[in-house]
Amino acid sequence: MPIVAVNARNQFRGRIIEIVEGPVISEVDVQTDGGIVTATITTRSIKHLKLAVGSQVLALIKSSDVVIATLRTANQDAP
């Protein structure tokens, strides 16, 4: 079945490299060309989607907030 159109513009194709399953919430690590994307989803969704290590997936990132931070080196003074 083809993927339907979605309005999330940040889409990353990748392969699941790890699933850390909890009783209710689980983490899914997806290796993409840009690095590893980690999703926190319900364990029920993992079972419903039949996700497994090695599965090819599309990670869709949709957020109303984006936080930007600067990095300091060890020799820079704290603010």
Image: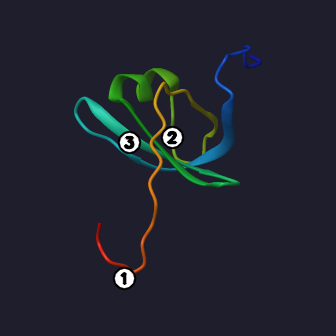
Tell me where residue 43 appears, x and y as whole percent.
Answer: 34, 29
Disc 2 designates what residue? 52
> Residue flagged by tag 2: what amino acid is it?
Ala
Disc 1 designates what residue? 74
Earlier-in-chain disc, 2 versus 1: 2
Label pair 2/3, CB-CB below 8 angstroms: no
Mark 2 or 1, which is nearer the eye? 1
Please identify the quarter of the rendering in which residue 22 is found. top left
Q: Classify mark 2: helix, strand or loop.
A: loop
> Residue flagged by tag 3: what amino acid is it?
Glu
Tell me where residue 17 appears, x and y as whole percent.
Answer: 53, 53
Mark 2 or 3, which is nearer the eye? 3
> Residue flagged by tag 1: what amino acid is it?
Ala
Question: Mark 3: few, some, or many residues within 10 Å (few <14, many ≥20)?
Answer: some
Disc 3 designates what residue? 27
Q: Residue at x 29, y 71 (%)?
A: 78
Q: Classify mark 1: helix, strand or loop.
A: loop
Q: How is the image coloured?
A: rainbow
Q: Residue at x 73, y 14 (%)?
A: 4
* Closest to the observer, 36 or 45: 36
Mark 3 or 1, which is nearer the eye? 1
Q: Which mark is residue 20?
A: none
Please identify the quarter of the rendering in which residue 75 is found. bottom left
